[in-house]
Amino acid sequence: MHIDMGMLVLIFVINFAYITLNTVRFLLVMRGYRYFAAFASVIEITIYVLGLSLVLNRLNNPINLVVYALGYGVGVYVGMAIEDRLALGYTMISVILPDPKSSLPGVLRENGFGVTQHAAYGLEGERLELEILAPRKNERRLYGLIKDAAPNAFVIAYEPRYISGGFWLKRVKRRNARRKKQ
């Protein structure tokens, strides 16, 4: 059995590129970037057909299939890393604090985060509950602020599907007004 290193590298790179693009496209669809996702899918399917045909025409060498699978796995990992770096969309963080007089809401507001707070009651008594909507690109910084100011906080994060009004609407209007003045 002859091993063509150039072909193995080509198969790996093609499937790596396909799956990386596939992962990013899927995440774009989930975040509502439909037009970018549609454009990416055209490129994605072209790469897919090319890579698959290379492997199917060379099934006599099982190493080709192994390299194809390796490209797949690495592509998923890199695609997720790219999406994590892009940090598209928003995250909604709910924080439940054991201390109803916690300074965390003030700390978060001083750092530019919009915070809605209200009293809550749990098994062990009165609590303070916070809701924070933040761009995903600020998520790690937000978690750091929460951990520093309230290490015992209970934190839940989820992705909002629809946002309208409130703190973000005012911020977007101010930003657009500044752009018009320039």
Image: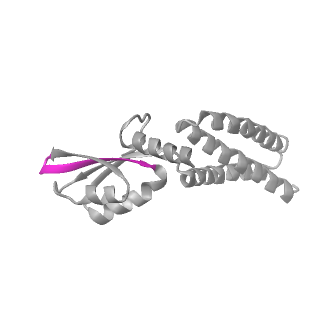
Left or right of residue 98, residue 34 in this image:
right
Decide: is 31 above or below 61: above
Q: Quadrant of residue 170?
A: top left
Whether residue 57 is visible here, answered yes or no, is yes
Q: Residue 123 colored magenta?
A: yes
Decide: is 172 above or below 86: above
Residue depicted at x 56% and y 42%: 27
Left or right of residue 15, residue 85 in this image:
left
Point out the residue furthest to the left here.
125
Q: Residue 11 colored magenta?
A: no
Q: How many marks?
A: 0
Quadrant in which the N terminus is drawn: bottom right
Model colouring: one colour
Give the image location of residue 132, x and y in percent: 34, 48
Left or right of residue 152, residue 48 in this image:
right
Give the image location of residue 50, x and y in percent: 81, 41
- Residue nearer the viewer, 28 or 22: 28
Give the image location of residue 14, x and y in percent: 76, 48
- Residue nearer the viewer, 8 or 85: 85
Left or right of residue 109, residue 164 in this image:
right
Residue depicted at x 47% and y 50%: 136
Q: Main secondary structure of the magenta part?
A: strand
- Residue nearer the viewer, 162 or 175: 175
Point out the residue furthest to the front here.
181
- Write the start and end of the magenta stretch as one range: 122-135
Give the image location of residue 65, x and y in percent: 74, 48
Whether residue 3 is visible here, answered yes or no, is no
Q: Quadrant of residue 106?
A: bottom left
